[in-house]
Amino acid sequence: MKPVNWKKYAFEFLSIFIAILAAFALDNWNDNRNDRVAEAKILTEILNGLEKDKEDVAMNILGHELGLKACTYWRNITKNQLYESDSLRQYYIVLTRDFISIQNTTGYETLKSRGLELVENDSLRERIVTLYEFDYQVLRKLEEEYGEMQFHENYFEVMNTVLLPYMQFDSIGSLSSIEYPLDLERNEENLLLSHLWKIEYNRNFVLREYQNVEKKILALKADLNVVLKR
């Protein structure tokens, strides 16, 4: 029998073992690299969507702020105080105007389909999920589903009925002026004032929600920019 060259076999075994280990390491590195590339693409998509969301939120904030000014405007008219006649049409239109909350969720939906754990940073992932799954849903429900916030449906017809006898229209049927001063009965005046107060209260409530979400969007955008620059 020939003597066995254990050193030779050990060397060959070690070479094969190192080659396999290196292959696994390379494969793992490649998978991790692909995940980081995918994460960057999805976070970029989310970042772009947040820019659009910020614009939509800003527009709705402006709309509700105009609604608050309309409440003050019509309260002055109801109490026969001075008002700017040039703003009559605008504040008539915006007094009970409703809004919808639109979110660009494409990037987030892509992330969910790939798995939320694709985002390595736990804190960043949690804030993304909270914004899309909670904060955006709150805004949508307040604007579109919560009955008390449906201003046109709840208040327009009732208030318009009280004001109709004092409205004056031009030759093409557009509201032009209000017959002044208003000769309202006590119940009519109180009805208008109570509805104006309720509209004002609810617009302030939803405004606080929008402003809170706006801050979260700006903070998340800043963090995403930092992550993507890395």
Image (spheres, rainbow, N blue to C red):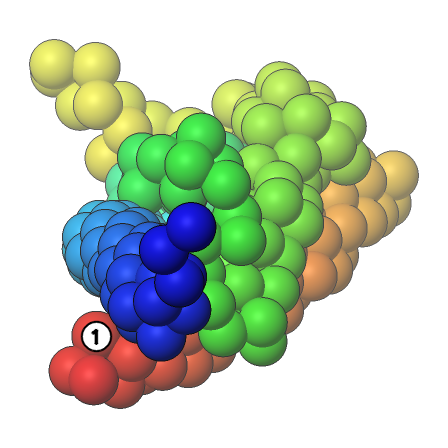
Q: Is residue 157 left or right of residue 165?
A: right
- Determine the residue located farthest toward the top in the rendered image: 172
Counting the numbered discs, the total is 1
Q: Is residue 118 visible?
A: yes
Q: Toward which corner of the image does residue 19 lie, by quadrant? A: bottom left
Residue 156 location, x and y as percent? 59, 26
* Residue at figure coordinates x 35%, y 35% from the top left: 110
- Determine the residue located farthest toward the front in the rendered image: 1
Q: Is residue 60 left or right of residue 54?
A: right
Residues 30 and 174: in front is 30
The residue under label 1 is which amino acid type? Leu
Residues 64 and 209: in front is 209
**Secondary structure of residue under mark 1:** helix
Residue 45 location, x and y as percent? 22, 50
Q: Toward which corner of the image does residue 9 lie, by quadrant? A: bottom left
Q: Toward which corner of the image does residue 226 lie, by quadrant? A: bottom left
Residue 215 location, x and y as percent? 47, 77
* Residue at figure coordinates x 36%, y 55% from the top left: 2
* Residue at figure coordinates x 12%, y 14% from the top left: 172
* Residue at figure coordinates x 57%, y 37% from the top left: 140
Q: Is residue 174 left or right of residue 179?
A: left
Mark 1 is surrounded, within 10 Å at the Cα level, by few (under 14), some (14 to 19) or many (20 or more) other residues, namely few
Residue 107 location, x and y as percent? 31, 42
Image height of 111 relative to 109, above or below: below
The quarter of the rendered structure image containing the C terminus is bottom left
Identify residue for label 1. Answer: 228
Residues 157 and 67: in front is 67
Image height of 53 relative to 25, above or below: above
